[in-house]
Image (cartoon, grey):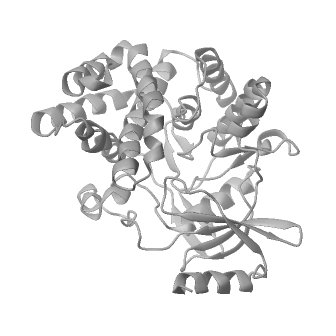
Amino acid sequence: MTSREADIQSFLKAAKWGAATRDPVPGDASSRRYERLSMDGQKAVLMDAPKGVETPSEPEGASIDERKALGYNALARIAGNNPEAFACIANELSKRGFSTPKIIAVDIDKGFMLLEDLGDDLYARVIERNPFVERKLYEAAVDTLAAIYRSSFPKHMSFQGHEWQVRDYDEAAMLAEVDLFLDWYAKDFGHDIKGDGRKEWHKLWMEAFKSFNAHAPGLALRDFHAENIFWLPERQAVSRVGLIDFQDGLFAHPAYDLASLLDDARRDVSETLKWDMMARFCEKAGIPADKNFTLAYYTMAAQRNTKILGIFVRLAERDGKLQYRALIPRVEENLRQNLGCMSELLDLENWLEEWVPELGT
């Protein structure tokens, strides 16, 4: 038995779940590990997030240069394996009526958390079983995002004496993410883009990011898509949408999570549904459904899909998670559509045609 396993057993015993049957959950893109627990007809989920296996998150007050020196997590404002981020954000969401997993027990120092099991009805599975409910589920998801945007959240969040500061999705974080495209996706085709090419890349994105200034930021969960949200029809209103994977949440443009949902890397969303849901989000969030929002949406979607292409190659090449390569063609198509929808993004499209022609924009 490893020392980590011994710690898990001690944690579960203290939480009165020591006799539970434990089944591993297939891994996701993070270094966290999950198990589903069953005991006496009850169910729970164990989150195992060992400290120190990722680059550190950003210390409070760190400069951009200090963030760069610490590594990607600090620069991109990723929480990494800090369970207090999940616990504190979950606490604030739950207090406002949103369905996050209830926290049954937690050991922040060791990186263990015992959570409510939200079940098996991920959006993607429910829709696969019954495609006719797709619009209904997406409407509920969009209504939940709009309600989160309308809610006010503190920057300093707490849970049982632990604290977490939710930061802004700043330019440095967004540029660090699009650089993943250069460092992994472009290099996958043999392109080593440095110097003037990289400087121009940054300049074009910084110009595009100005579209975000048209709207006030809100809390973005940062990984909101059909395989990360649950359908809980027995609950009411926005609580019918079960939320997980929000520990990396930041204050960002309101289009961020909407783009994550509608420009899904894992399933196709029709243009008709996408446009309808964009309009519905604006109505529910109290935002004019005009060109300002459309431009901000497609800019955010393009930024996110650019990042995802880099992440998926990195997961395959560095981490041996080869299954992510199968998702790349959909993300490529999403990015091409994002850039082609707005003339303001033409310069980015032209840059990609010159430097990474394999993308075929």
Q: Which quarter of the figure is the C terminus placed in?
A: top left
Q: Quarter of the image for the N terminus: give it.
A: bottom right
- What residue is shown at x 51% (from left), y 22% (from top)? 293
Counting from the top left corner in percent of width and height, residue 28 is at 54, 54
Horizontally, residue 183 falls left or right of residue 78, namely left
Q: Camera-side residue: 68 or 31?
A: 31
Residue 323 image offset from top left, x and y in percent: 48, 45
The quarter holding residue 55 reads bottom left
Q: Is residue 90 visible?
A: yes
Q: Is residue 23 above or below residue 330?
A: below
Report the residue at 41% width, 73% height from top: 52
Residue drawn at x 75%, y 26% is 131
Return the residue found at the far left. Answer: 195
Query: Relative to residue 6, is residue 355 depicted above or below?
Result: above
The residue nearer to you, when weighing 213 against 202, is: 202
Direction from residue 231 to residue 163 in the image, left or right: left
Q: Position of residue 163 (x, y in %)?
A: 55, 69
Q: Nearer the viewer, residue 188 or 298?
A: 188
Q: Quadrant of residue 276?
A: top right
Q: Residue at x 23, y 58 (%)?
A: 65
Pick the residue in front: 300 or 320. Answer: 320
Q: How many marks?
A: 0
When asked about the image quadrant of residue 140, the answer is top right
**Residue 170 appearing in the image:** no
Task: Return the x and y of residue 39 as percentages of the image width and height.
Answer: 83, 72
